[in-house]
Each structure stands twice: as structure tokens, then as C-alpha cells.
Amino acid sequence: MRWFVLFLLLCVWVAPADAAEFLIYNTDHWTKKLSAEDKAKWTRHEQLKFAAVHEKGDIVEVRPDGYWTTRKYRTDVFRVVKKPGLDYKKYLHLMKAVENDTPDSITGKTYLQLRRKGKIDALDNIVDKVAR
């Protein structure tokens, strides 16, 4: 009986965590707080560069269960959302940025369309901003 109990404890201890933790950008970017007059002074490069900044709710990182409980992060800028029953590896693609397909006609550079592909909405639902 003792071996059976030890076996069960070992199975529970070694079993993979079945949850995902999302580090979420939880504030407005400084460029969102500027007035239209300030933004009008920007060069074309700055306008395109700052068009894709972190938005409130963007998924910055996706990690396995327990990752953010043992690490420090700025609680004034980020928050952690734990989603039980999810395999974090299926959501890693939401951390990627989305680039425009064609370079700008004036600067010749390719700029980001979205800083992050995924976000968490106000109800903590996972949203893919590209696949709408």
C-alpha cells in the first residue's frame, strides 16, 4: 500500500502542468497619450514606426504554469493571466509581431503592422488580432 501511495504522489508531482500563463501589457503606450499636434510634427518614419506599438491587452509572453509566480515583473505595466487547461505551446504564435507585406513607398522600409499578434480582452479571453 505504501508503494502505491508513493507512486501516486510521484505521478502527481511529475505530471506536466496543464495551464498557460500570459504576460499582458496592461497600460497605454506613451505615444497614445500624445496630442494630435504633437503627432503632426513626426516624420513619416516616426508615424509608421509608432503606428505599431504595444496596445493595452497585448500578449507579451506565453509561459507554462508557475513561470511568473517565481519571477519578477513590473506590476504597474504588466499583469499575468493564468488560463487552466491550456497547453502554452499552442499559443506561442500570439507573441509574434505582424509585418506589413510591402515596404513603404517613400522610405523603402518595411514596418510592423501590429506589435503583437495576440491579446487578452477585458474578460480575459484570448484573441488573435489577425484571424478575425
Image (cartoon, rainbow, N blue to C red):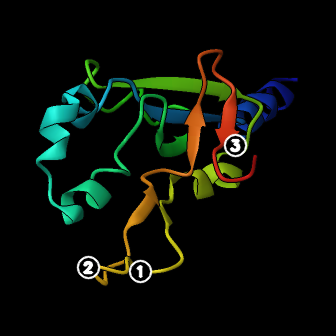
Amino acid beneath label 3: Pro
Amino acid beneath label 1: Pro
What crowding class fits label 2: few (fewer than 14 Cα within 10 Å), some (14-19), or many (20 or more)? few
Q: Is residue 17 left or right of residue 67?
A: right
Q: Is mark 1 on a helix, strand or loop?
A: loop
Residue located beneath label 1 in the image: 103
Q: In this view, does 47 lie to the left or right of 55?
A: left
Residue located beneath label 3 in the image: 16
Q: Quadrant of residue 74?
A: top left
Which mark identifies residue 18? none
What crowding class fits label 3: few (fewer than 14 Cα within 10 Å), some (14-19), or many (20 or more)? few
Q: Position of residue 38 (x, y in %)?
A: 12, 37
Q: Are marks 1 and 2 in contact (CB under 8 Å)?
A: yes
What crowding class fits label 1: few (fewer than 14 Cα within 10 Å), some (14-19), or many (20 or more)? few
Q: Position of residue 115 (x, y in %)?
A: 42, 52
Q: How many marks?
A: 3
Q: What element carries label 3?
A: loop
Q: Earlier in the sequence, mark 2 or mark 3?
A: 3
Which residue occupies 48% across, 50% down?
A: 116
Nearer the observer: mark 2 or 3; the answer is 2
Gap in angstroms between the C-alphas marked 2 and 3: 49 Å
Q: Is residue 46 left or right of residue 94?
A: left
Q: Position of residue 113 (x, y in %)?
A: 47, 59
Amino acid beneath label 2: Thr
Q: Are marks 2 and 3 in contact (CB under 8 Å)?
A: no
- Between 11 and 4, the one lying in front of the other is 11
Which residue occupies 36% across, 30% down?
A: 70
Gap in angstroms between the C-alphas marked 1 and 2: 8 Å
Q: Are marks 3 and 1 in contact (CB under 8 Å)?
A: no
User: Would you place residue 109 above or below residue 21 in this image?
Assistant: below
Q: Position of residue 10 (x, y in %)?
A: 71, 36
Residue located beneath label 2 in the image: 107
